[in-house]
Amino acid sequence: MGGYMTKTSGTSTRRHASDEVERRLADALERLGHGLRSLAQRSAREHGLSPLQQQAVLALVRQPAARREVSALAAEFDVTSPTMSDAVAALERKGLVTRSPGLDGRRRLLSLTDAGQQVARELAPWDGPLLEAFARLPAPDRDTTLHSLLRVIADLQRQGVVSVARTCTTCRFFEPDAHADASAPHHCHLLRVPLPLADLRTDCSEHQPATD
Ligand code: SF4
């Protein structure tokens, strides 16, 4: 139990044969990254925000109170706390975010104002073209793509490249390949249910990091 193990064995010949595909996959993801950055910049610009300010607004809609702080947002988006603090200060000046004392009276809890909630609703479809492209894929392709991407994210987290990932593949409750049923091969030991590929989560509120 506890996420996927990284397989380091394998012959150099086999590895050489797959290098080209790996290279092209990395190139394809890089190209996707460029496209998404461009979409995000366009959407943020239309609302007078920087891309990081846009990410903060969108995150504050869905984050539980415990993660609505500058340091948690900084970790979420792989930026330093001072950089995120500047972005939040700009959002405060724009009247989109307020700070209030947290439960311990010391920490500063961030919340969207009414104007911030309205902007968040307008920003929500920023990645619509990507969702539409995924929707045009056959369902089995979508499911296996989700599965493969989550495995890659888990591997990158183990390598220290991705810092925050509340995905099934990085969760201590996740047991890969626990069932013979190919339509639901994995298992969640917290929910005690088999997990079909399409149900694998990317931001689970029950997630606890695997320790492997
Ligand atoms: S559904 Fe949530 S708790 Fe269960 S394995 Fe996935 S991330 Fe972990």
Image (cartoon, grey):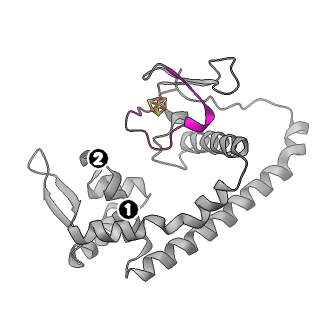
Residue 111 numbered mark, or none? none
Q: Residue 120 or 165: which is nearer the viewer?
A: 120
Q: Is disc 2 surrounded by few (<14), some (14 to 19) or many (20+) residues within 10 Å?
A: few
Name the residue beneath numbered marker 2.
64
Q: Would residue 71 be found to the left or right of residue 132 on screen?
A: left
Q: Which residue carries the number 1 mark?
A: 58
**Measured along the vertical axis of the image, is residue 106 above or below residue 173?**
below
User: How far separated are the C-alphas under marks 1 and 2?
Assistant: 13 Å
Residue at screen point 47% across, 76% down? 43
23 up-or-down from 56: above or below = above
Disc 1 marks a residue whose amino acid type is Leu
Q: Amino acid at mark 2?
A: Pro
Task: Answer with the quarter of the image where residue 209 lies.
Answer: top left
What secondary structure prevails in the magenta region? Answer: loop
Neighbour class for label 1 at 10 Å: few (<14), some, many (≥20)?
Answer: some
Give x and y (percent) for residue 94: 24, 78
Q: Position of residue 193 (x, y in %)?
A: 50, 21
Q: Is mark 1 within 8 Å of ligand 1?
A: no
In the picture, measured across the screen, residue 208 lies left or right of residue 97, that is: right
Q: Magenta residues?
A: 193-212
* Residue at the (62%, 18%) spot, across then down: 178
Res. 103 in view: yes
Question: Disc 1 vs disc 2: Cβ atoms closer than 8 Å?
Answer: no
Residue in the picture at 31% in, 58% down = 60
Look at the numbered disc 2 and give the secondary structure of its residue.
loop
**In the rendered image, is residue 88 in sight?**
no
Q: Residue at x 45, y 43 (%)?
A: 203
Q: Is residue 83 magenta?
A: no
